[in-house]
């Protein structure tokens, strides 16, 4: 996918950028001036770029992967700061905070919705491109990786030191570890070793006070939250310490494609029933796409072993695939990284160091998690949706296998909760090349309809999503100001029960909500969420008042809560409110399966009293309630 270019050239380019910026950057508004003054007071050597300087656009665009956010109307930062070391990141945080500026941190710039470099309020981008060293310690089987490094750089540096160590992260070499590890990080080694975030053993983070914390000084709760709770909510991670994983000298890769008329559906049906049960060493991902008017399925296999061993495994568990040795190629683990990233396996490894974004396109994605295999009828329905899509569109679906190590790790071990209950994860994608709002709307509308079509066949209550495949359609707030209630709309889908703990950690470590974005973890405002099957509404307590906040449903049908919301609010929780709440709860219980009231006991006394009153008046027993207690 990427155009090869030498790493040396790249680093020379950035050295030039740095030197140029220190001498030539100029700011232009009072806010910028004050911020710059503050930065210079901290250190005279912090590179930054104002919009009126020549390199501003080059740097801004350098890591943008989604062309949707490269338009003239995309909001641009007031300044881009490119720190050279941790102290520059600290200075950026301190100065943004002092001058009330929104800070967005960018590592690899691959956020699906551009949240690392766009905002709906004036903002500063802190781009970690110059903080990207990778220090591998083969004796210890670990590495310290600065957050601005790309996955390609990490993999390359590991392979430079050892051919028997690897790391379980994603398959695209330009993805940054800052965002990727913060949200999980799924790749071809996930069934054997889990996610990237499952293999992080320490970190350095700049908090909202501008202090640097490591695992020991931040404590286990914050360390838990930053490994999968999503970037941009808890601080700026400046480095991760990762645990390397053992890989054999020889691995085997194969890519086998079949069109619909060649029996592709039967293969997908079989794959769904076995992919999550296969030995951990065997990873088979499925890609569904349309090639002109033909529908094609590609089985992308990575096996930690030789071709002979792979054929033995596959011919036993998945003989229908008809895999032969001519479909397979033996290689080293690092060559498999090239291969999965569309580079020739025998090509130079240093293409992995190239950060240049080529072949960037417009795209929108959504994700789902699957518990039960799709039937043939569902598969036919999927193909029909692909077939009906406009000719200029390129609909695509990736089905990634779960099971193996992913299922062994507990749901709350890190914030990424999607574990043993799932057989696979689906990514729905629409790609397009034509500029303009019309093409964009057409593609995004199609994807939303497709997502609607998939609703009955994927996880429910919540309809789980993967934060690294960020989707603002799940809900978002302006400038990261979501209440708990609003943030539950996406938080529960991304993090399920771990959302509660993330809110607690956020409230403790960043109570002023300095680190925020349109889908960040909110600070606890004292709400009582009621989760009802596929729908989430929230009873919200504040200063003794009961209110039903905005409701979030896939269908938009929330009349019961709207009725309660329109109730007159008094200064106190009044009997009428409680009667109404009880009535609504009863109605909802009758209408929906298994309603759950989630109570949070973490805030003030008044709030706890409110909860007691509510539970008492709703006549809920402990059996009806799922208490999430965090004191
Ligand atoms: C082409 C492509 C391929 C991908 N392949 C995979 C894959 O194989 N597997 C997979 O799991 N995911 C994959 N992803 C998704 C990817 O993991 C996420 O988009 C990830 O968040 C990108 O990290 P980044 O640093 O490049 O992004 P950025 O846009 O820089 O950051 C993403 C988010 O994290 C925040 N953030 C960034 N750096 C830091 C930091 N240092 N400290 C705190 N917060 C930070 C940002 O503010 C933003 O909110 C892919 C994405 C793309 C575009």
Image (cartoon, helix red, strand yellow):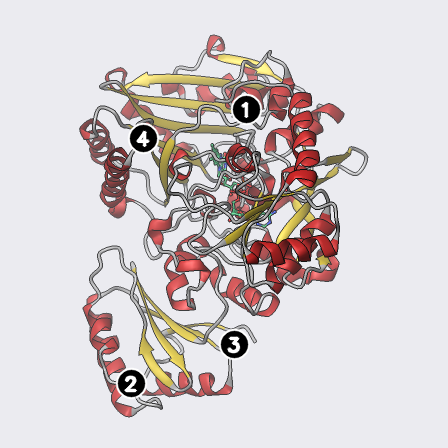
Measured in 3D between alpha carbons, the distance from the residue under mark 1 to the one under mark 3, in whole angstroms, is 47 Å
* Residue at position x 24%, y 29% in the image: 386
Q: Which residue is mark 4?
A: 435
Point out the tag, 4 or 1, that comes first from the N-terminus: 1
Badge 3 element: loop
Looking at the image, residue 392 sits to the left or right of residue 523; the answer is left
Q: Earlier in the sequence, mark 4 or mark 2?
A: 4
Disc 3 from disc 4: Cα separation: 48 Å
Residue annotated with mark 2: 569
- Viewer-proximal residue, 190 or 41? 41
Q: Secondary structure at mark 4?
A: loop
Q: What element does badge 1 sit on?
A: strand
Extreme right residue here?
139
Q: Nearer the viewer, mark 2 or mark 1?
A: 2
Give yes or no for contact between labels 1 and 3 (Cβ–Cβ under 8 Å).
no
User: Residue 179 shows which numbered tag?
Assistant: none
The response on whether ligand 1 sits within 8 Å of label 2 is no
* Residue occupying image coordinates x 65% and y 30%: 153
Contact, mark 2 vs mark 1 (Cβ under 8 Å): no
Residue 40 position, x and y percent, is: 71, 52
Separation (CA) of disc 2 from disc 3: 24 Å
Residue placed at 25% from the left, 24% from the top?
Answer: 392
Marked residue nearer the N-terminal end (2 or 3): 2
First in sequence: mark 3 or mark 4? 4
Q: Disc 1 designates what residue?
A: 303
Q: Position of residue 273 (x, y in %)?
A: 37, 34
Mark 2: give few (<14), some (14-19) or many (20+) Cα within 10 Å.
some
Name the element at disc 2.
loop
Q: Is residue 180 above or below residue 101?
A: above
For the question of whether residue 131 can be seen, the reply is no
Label disc, if present, on residue 602 of the rendered structure:
3
């Amino acid at each position: 996918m990427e155009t090869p270019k030498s790493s040396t050239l790249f680093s020379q380019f950035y050295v030039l950028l740095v030197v140029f910026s220190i001498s030539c950057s100029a700011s232009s508004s009072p806010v910028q001036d004050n911020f710059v003054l503050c930065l210079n007071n901290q250190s005279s050597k912090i590179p930054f770029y104002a919009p009126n300087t020549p390199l501003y656009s080059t740097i801004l665009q350098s890591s943008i992967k989604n062309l949707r956010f490269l338009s003239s109307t995309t909001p641009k930062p007031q300044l881009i700061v490119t720190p050279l070391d941790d102290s520059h990141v600290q200075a950026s945080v301190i100065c943004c905070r002092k001058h009330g500026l929104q800070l967005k941190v960018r590592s690899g710039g691959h956020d699906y919705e551009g949240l690392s470099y766009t905002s709906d309020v004036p903002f500063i981008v802190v781009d970690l491109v110059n903080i990207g060293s990778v220090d591998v310690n083969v004796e210890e089987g670990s590495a310290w990786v600065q957050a601005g490094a790309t996955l390609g750089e990490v993999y390359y540096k590991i392979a430079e030191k050892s051919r028997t160590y690897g790391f379980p992260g994603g398959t695209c070499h330009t993805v940054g570890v800052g965002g990727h590890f913060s949200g999980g990080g799924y790749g071809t080694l996930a069934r054997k070793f889990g996610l990237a975030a499952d293999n992080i053993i320490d970190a350095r983070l700049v908090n909202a006070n501008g202090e640097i914390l490591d695992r020991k000084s931040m404590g286990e709760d914050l360390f838990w939250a930053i490994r999968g709770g999503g970037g941009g909510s808890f601080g700026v991670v400046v480095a991760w310490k990762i645990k390397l994983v053992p890989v054999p000298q020889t691995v085997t890769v194969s890519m086998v494609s079949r069109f619909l008329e060649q029996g592709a559906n039967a293969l997908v049906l079989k794959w769904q029933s076995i992919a999550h049960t296969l030995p951990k060493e065997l990873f088979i991902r499925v890609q569904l796409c349309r090639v002109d008017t033909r529908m094609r399925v590609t089985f992308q296999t990575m096996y930690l072993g030789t071709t002979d061993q792979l054929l033995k495994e596959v011919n036993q568990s998945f003989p229908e695939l008809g895999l032969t040795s001519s479909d397979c190629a033996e290689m080293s683990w690092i060559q498999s990284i090239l291969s999965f990233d569309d580079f020739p396996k025998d090509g130079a490894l240093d293409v992995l160091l190239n950060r240049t974004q080529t072949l960037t396109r417009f795209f929108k994605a959504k994700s789902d998690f699957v518990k039960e295999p799709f039937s043939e009828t569902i598969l036919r329905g999927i193909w029909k949706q692909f077939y009906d899509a406009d000719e200029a569109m390129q609909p695509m679906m990736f089905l990634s296998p779960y099971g193996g190590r992913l299922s062994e790790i507990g749901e709350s071990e890190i914030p990424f909760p999607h574990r043993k209950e799932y057989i696979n994860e689906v990514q729905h994608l629409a790609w397009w090349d034509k500029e303009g709002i019309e093409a964009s709307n057409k593609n995004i509308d199609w994807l939303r309809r497709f997502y609607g079509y998939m609703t009955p066949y994927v996880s429910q209550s919540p309809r789980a999503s993967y934060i690294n495949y960020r989707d603002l359609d799940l809900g978002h707030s302006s400038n990261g100001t979501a209440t708990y209630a609003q943030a539950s709309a996406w938080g529960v889908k991304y993090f399920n029960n771990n959302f509660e703990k993330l809110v607690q950690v956020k409230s403790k470590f960043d109570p002023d909500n300095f680190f925020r974005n349109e889908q960040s973890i909110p600070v606890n405002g004292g709400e009582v969420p009621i989760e009802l099957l596929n729908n989430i509404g929230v009873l919200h307590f504040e200063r003794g008042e009961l209110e039903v906040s905005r409701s979030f449903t896939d269908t938009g049908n929330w009349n019961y809560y709207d009725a309660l919301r329109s109730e007159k609010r008094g200064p106190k929780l009044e009997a009428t409110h409680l009667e109404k709440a009880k009535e609504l709860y009863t109605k909802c219980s009758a209408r929906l399966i298994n309603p759950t009231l989630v109570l949070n006991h973490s805030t003030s006394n008044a709030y706890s009293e409110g909860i007691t009153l509510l539970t008492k008046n709703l006549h809920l027993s402990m059996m009806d309630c799922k208490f999430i207690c965090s004191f």
